[in-house]
Amino acid sequence: MTSEDTNTVATAPEPDWDAQAAAFDDEPDHGLRDPEVRAAWSDRLGAWLPEHPADVLDLGCGTGSLSLLAVEQGHRVTAVDRSPVMTERARTKLAGRAAVLCGDAVNPPVGERRFDVVLVRHVLWTLPDPAGVLRRWRELLRPGGRFVLVEGVWGTLSPVGIPAGELTAFLAPLAREVRVERLSGHTLLWGKEVDDERYAVVATV
Ligand SMILES: C[S@@+](CC[C@H](N)C(=O)[O-])C[C@H]1O[C@@H](n2cnc3c(N)ncnc32)[C@H](O)[C@@H]1O
């Protein structure tokens, strides 16, 4: 367990994700169009996900870029997004290789199914009550399953997001092992230099 100071950063008003969908993949880390950026994310994801083919639930999947990488690594992916336009784009990108559902990430429409991995990138910080959401997501994991959470704090003047210390504190009662990987210095992931807080947490339950 990594222990870090916790401090709260403001949440922003929720963007109109339907309106943002058309340009979403223009950001290097969203669309993963640059082969070097894509390879950087693929390498990271490969290290965070189980070695064997696993059931992965990608919540707030957006246009499905990470889902596609997970599929390409042999995993069985279910992707969920609340934005109908994002969902449609993810369906196109995944071309039938994953189940893409339109629904709420907080209570995803997966019935009694359980998963080996709950994968969430850049979504948790937008949700009210992230600690409660993590408790709910914990119920979606099989014993020995893991959270793979990629989050951060964006901007310096009026930062928004969730600091790693806060997220790991929320996970402490839910997971037996919590590992933080700092990502800010890894320019290839972002396609540019960044100086704000970017990280991934892999938490095994
Ligand atoms: C910043 S994007 C991240 C997309 C994707 N995870 C990625 O990393 O490329 C946030 C996504 O979360 C979705 N989202 C936000 N709140 C949601 C909710 N309560 N349920 C489902 N999806 C949600 C938005 O529609 C949007 O597609």
Image: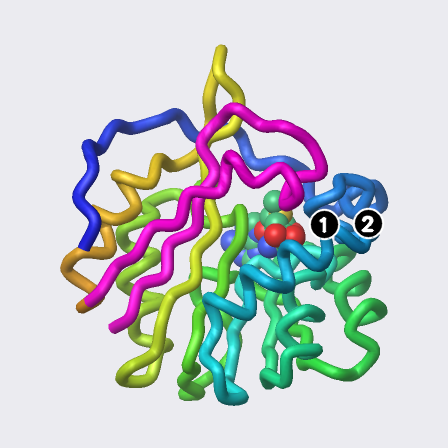
Question: Which of 44 and 171 lies nearest the eye of the viewer?
Answer: 44
Asked which secondary structure carries label 2, the reply is: loop
**What residue did someone put label 1 on?**
37
Residue 68 higher or lower than 172, as above or below: below
Amino acid found under the numbered disc labelled 1: Val
Residue stretch rendered in magenta on the structure: 177-205
Q: Residue at x 48, y 82 (%)?
A: 51
Element on which disc 1 rests: helix
Tell me where residue 113 sits by quadrant.
bottom left
Residue ID at (50%, 85%): 54
Q: Residue at x 78, y 73 (%)?
A: 94
Name the residue located 73 percent from the left edge and 63 percent from the top edge. 87
Q: Which residue is mark 2?
A: 34
Q: Is residue 49 left or right of residue 89?
A: left
Q: Position of residue 197 (x, y in %)?
A: 44, 32
Residue 131: x and y, percent? 27, 50
